[in-house]
Image: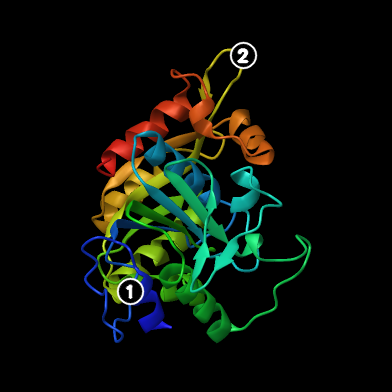
Amino acid sequence: MAESKCSSCNVEGCKSRGNPDAENACLDHIKNKLVILSGKGGVGKSTVAANLAIALADRGKKVGLLDVDVHGPSIPRIMGLKGRKAELKPPWLLPVKWSGNLSVISIGFLLPDDNEAVIWRGPVKGSLIKQFIEEVAWGNLDYLVVDCPPGTGDEPLSVLQILGNDAKAVIVTTPQAVSIDDVRRSITFCNKVGNPVAGVIENMSGFVCPKCSEKVDIFGSGAGEQLARDTGVPYLGAIPLSREIVKSGDAGRALTELPGDHPVKKELYRIVEMLGA
C-alpha cells in the first residue's frame, strides 16, 4: 500500500515520494496539525473543532477536518453534511468537500446507516485512525484539525502518535470545576506523550441574552484562564453560550454566518488569530 500511494502521490516536494518504506506518506504536506481535546464530554468540543476549521478556511487557509469519534461522530451533522458518503478512489479515500478550502472525513460518511452502532475495540479503532490520516487524499493543507472523543484513551493517543510531536493540542473546557478537573488531565496527557498544548479554550463562558446582549455567567467564568495559568499553557479565549450555537449545530450552519459584531463570532476569529492564522 505504501508503495502504491507514493507512486501515485502528486504533492510537489513530498519527502516520501518514491519511498516505499515511508510510514507517514501523507503527513509531509500538512503544515499545521491541531488536535482538539477535552477530558470531559459535553463541553462543546466538536462544535469548537468544526467552527475553528470553518473560520480557518474562511481566512483563506486550506483545511482538513478529521472526526475520529468512532462511536459518536457528530461532525457530519454540525457541518451540514449528514447523509453524504466518502468516495473510495484506490488507493485513496476522498474526503467530503464542505467548501473549496475545507474537506472533511468522518466514519459517519462510511456507515450504511446513521443509526448503526460501531462496536469496536482499541486496535481496530487505531487502524481506522491511521487510515484516515495516511490514506485520505487531503492534498496540501495549511491546517489539519482533528476532533477527538473526550478522555485520554485510544483515539487521542493514536492520533498524537501517528501525527507526531509537532501536532499541537487545543484543550476545550467549560468553567465548572468538574470539567476543569478532567480537562487538567488532558494537559498532563499531552505532557506525557510529548505534544505541545497550543492553548485552552473556555467554552460556554457565560450566556449572551438574545434580547439585551447582557452576558450572564450561568456556569461561572474564568476557570479556563486560571487552568491555563496554573499549567503554564497559553489561554486562547472564552466562547460565550448562545442559542445561535445550538441552532447552527442542529441545522448544520457555520457560526461564521453570524453577524460580524456577534460576540461568539468575534471571539472565534480572535482565537483563530491567537493560533497564528
Point 52% across, 26% down: residue: 257
Numbered badge on residue 25? 1
Q: Earlier in the sequence, mark 2 or mark 1?
A: 1
Numbered badge on residue 244? none
- Most foreground residue, 25 or 250: 25
Please indicate whether residue 173 sits to the left or right of residue 163 in the image: right
Front label number (2 vs 1): 1
- Most foreground residue, 34 or 43: 34
- Please tell me whether residue 173 is drawn above or below residue 208 in the rendered image: below
**What amino acid is found at the position of numbered circle 1 in the picture?**
Ala
**What amino acid is found at the position of numbered circle 2 in the picture?**
Lys
Q: Alpha-carbon distance for marks 2 and 1?
A: 52 Å
Point 25% across, 65% down: residue: 166
Quarter of the image for residue 35 reads: bottom left
* Residue 110 in picture, x, y percent from top left: 65, 65
Q: Residues within 10 Å of mark 1 (few under 14, many from 20)?
A: many
Q: Secondary structure at mark 1?
A: loop
* Residue 215 in picture, x, y percent from top left: 51, 24
